[in-house]
Image (cartoon, rainbow, N blue to C red):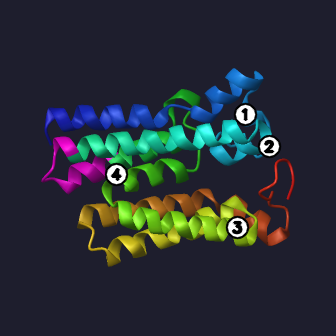
Amino acid sequence: MTISLILLAMASYAAGGVPTGYCISRRLKGIDIREHGSGNPGASNVYRVVGARAGLATLAVDALKGCAPAAAARRLFPDNPWAWAFCGAAAIVGHIWTPFLGLKGGKGVATSAGVFAALVPIPAAGAALVFLAGATLSRHISVGSIAAAVALPLFAALSGAPAPVLCLASGAAALILVKHIPNMRRLASGDEPGLRRGGR
């Protein structure tokens, strides 16, 4: 492992760790988003608590936090997919366990989407469609996220993605599913918030 790769991975972790939803909520409403709604600083909670524009802005920046490091790794190490996966993983881990909020960040969905948009755009687009279908049909963002997490490794495998990227897709999917266990429990009990702001 080269020094340049180590430095890029560190930068990827730091970029992934930028607490977008927390910063936007502080800026627009003067609130700590962790004390409102579900308590998660991700895009869906920001959408429900702060508003649609704030939620979409959080989503876009969180995705960029994953896309930029993965794209940089692919450009700087074009023949080393392990380097791509390493930096992509660093960004995702940084988002989920951000050093800026006591290692308590988001669930990794948007940042993972950005990573795979840079590394395997066609499978990522397929997973995005699965997300939209799941969220629209169920009226729950969490259902779309769970469905997309399950679909992504399958699409990546079917596309012939390099083994390191396929490993990353499987690992990211597992992390996202684990982070959504509370959502699964609320879905089972009928207490999961729906797409409408502040409601089901």
Numbered mark located on residue 118 in the image: 4
Mark 2: which secondary structure? loop
Q: Which residues are magenta?
A: 75-87
Is 78 situated above or below 165? above
Q: Amino acid at mark 4?
A: Ala
Residue 82: x and y, percent? 22, 54
Q: Amino acid at mark 2?
A: Gly
Q: Which residue is mark 1?
A: 33
87 vs 40, left or right, is left
Mark 4: which secondary structure? helix
The CA span between labels 4 and 3 is 25 Å
Q: Which residue is mark 3?
A: 136
The quadrant the N terminus occupies is: top left
Numbered mark located on residue 37 in the image: 2
Specify few, some or many for label 1: CA neighbours under 10 Å numbering under 14, 14-19, or 20 or more. many
- Magenta span dominant secondary structure: helix
Task: Verify CB contact (< 8 Å) between mark 1 and mark 4.
Answer: no
Residue 146: x and y, percent? 60, 66
Q: State yes or no: residue 84 in magenta.
A: yes
The quadrant the C terminus occupies is: bottom right
The CA span between labels 1 and 2 is 8 Å
